[in-house]
Amino acid sequence: MTEAVRLGALDFIRKPALPETLIRSVRDALSAREKETILAVDDEPMNLMATEEIFGIRYHIRTASSGEEALREVEERKPELVLLDLHMPGMDGLEVMARIREIEGCENLPVVFLTADDDADTEAEIFKAGAMDFIRKPFVMQVALQRIRHVLELKHLQDSMQEEVDRKTEAITENNRKIQNLSKQVILALAGTIDAKDPYTKGHSSRVADYALEMAKRMNKSEREQTEIYSIALLHDVGKIGIPLSIINKPGRLTPEEYEEIKSHTLRGYDILKTISELPELSVGARWHHERYDGNGYPDRKAGEDIPEVARIICVADCYDAMSSDRSYRKALPQRMVRSEIENGRGTQFDPDIARIMLKMIDEDTDYKMRGDTDGK
């Protein structure tokens, strides 16, 4: 049997053989036609020649006589396995393996050590360093071939599993992206429906969202937080869907009853959005964007930092757009007056730090581009 392998046989099957054993051996033999590359590293030329003769039966063998040469080979050739002598002058086998792990794409390259040591400490050290196996010298050819084959089969199995994990992860990522895109489209559609109720507030939701996003950026929020703040701001007025048009578009002063109806849009919006379990944060802005920093807002008379930060951001953005836009009951206020109102509201109506950010945005907006279609003069 050993002679048959030496002469070039890929494997042998003892008779009588089970059908599954025969099938597996034939499959392995067919797959072995594409020889895998093994890098043999040893400072003794005779050992390298012996390794080539023994393992060359099944594998394409490349050789290196030092750690430095081995690292170059690994970087350039990317072998399927490294057969590494443990004790070499200069850079020993353990150091070579550690350096291999630093090469991009070789973090999990299988390493099998060759060693004449016959003690438990060496064995423990080899496995602790991350080797997949070791072969003691002098070795039995058939045993060595089997151990190498088992290591490569394990690596192929790991690679297959990783590919499957990558495919599943990619599919999940793609599904999440589609869900996020769909959520964005639904949010935009809802925001458009809100603004369509009142010609005077057309584009209000998107402008408030833009202002809120710019403030979030200046507050060094993460990209995820910026996206959340933008989405929450887009839907801050969703509760107005349930308010009669006659009240929303009324040009004159509202009665106390009508004002209470307008105020109810915060709770209506909260009730609508809290049902979206996948995006629970959306309801926060709808409910609390009319709270005041001094506690005199509605609907819950929250104060200071008890008001969620996103609602404090939307409060400033909403008030800026309301003052700088035409409404059914008045024309847009000049930019200087809008700025004065926000300055005077710091610490009472508005979070002082967030209001300061809006004031800086106003001061930088010398061309009045923030105001949409209205003139800021």
Image (cartoon, rainbow, N blue to C red):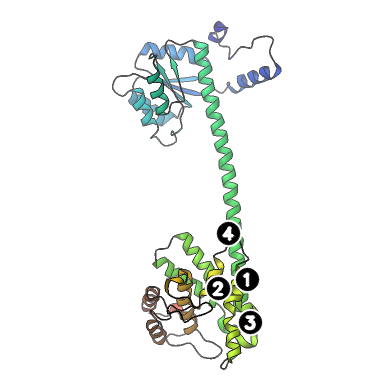
Alpha carbons under labels 3 and 2: distance apart: 14 Å
Looking at the rendered image, the disc whose residue lies closer to the viewer, 1 or 4, is 1
x, y percent for residue 315: 47, 76
Disc 2 element: helix
Quadrant in the rendering for residue 278: bottom right
- Three-letter amino acid code at disc 1? Ile
Amino acid marked by disc 2: Ala
Residue 75 percent location from the top left of the image: 40, 31
Image quadrant holding the C terminus, namely bottom left
Separation (CA) of disc 1 from disc 2: 9 Å
Instruction: Give the number of the disc on residue 243.
Output: 3
Q: Amino acid at mark 3?
A: Ile
Provide the residue designation for mark 4.
180
Residue 286 marker = 2
Question: In the displayed structure, would residue 248 be above or below residue 181?
Answer: below
Whether label 1 touches label 2, CB < 8 Å: yes
For the residues bearing labels 1 and 3, Cβ distance under 8 angstroms: no
Q: Position of residue 136 (x, y in %)?
A: 43, 14
Viewport quadrant of the N terminus: top right
The secondary element bearing badge 4 is classed as: helix
Nearer to us: label 4 or label 3? 3
In the image, taking residue 332 as reference, residue 27 lies left or right, namely right
The residue mark sitting in front, 2 or 4, is 2
N-terminal-most mark, 1 or 4? 4
Disc 1 or 3, which lies upstream in sequence? 3
Per the image, the residue denoted by label 1 is: 272
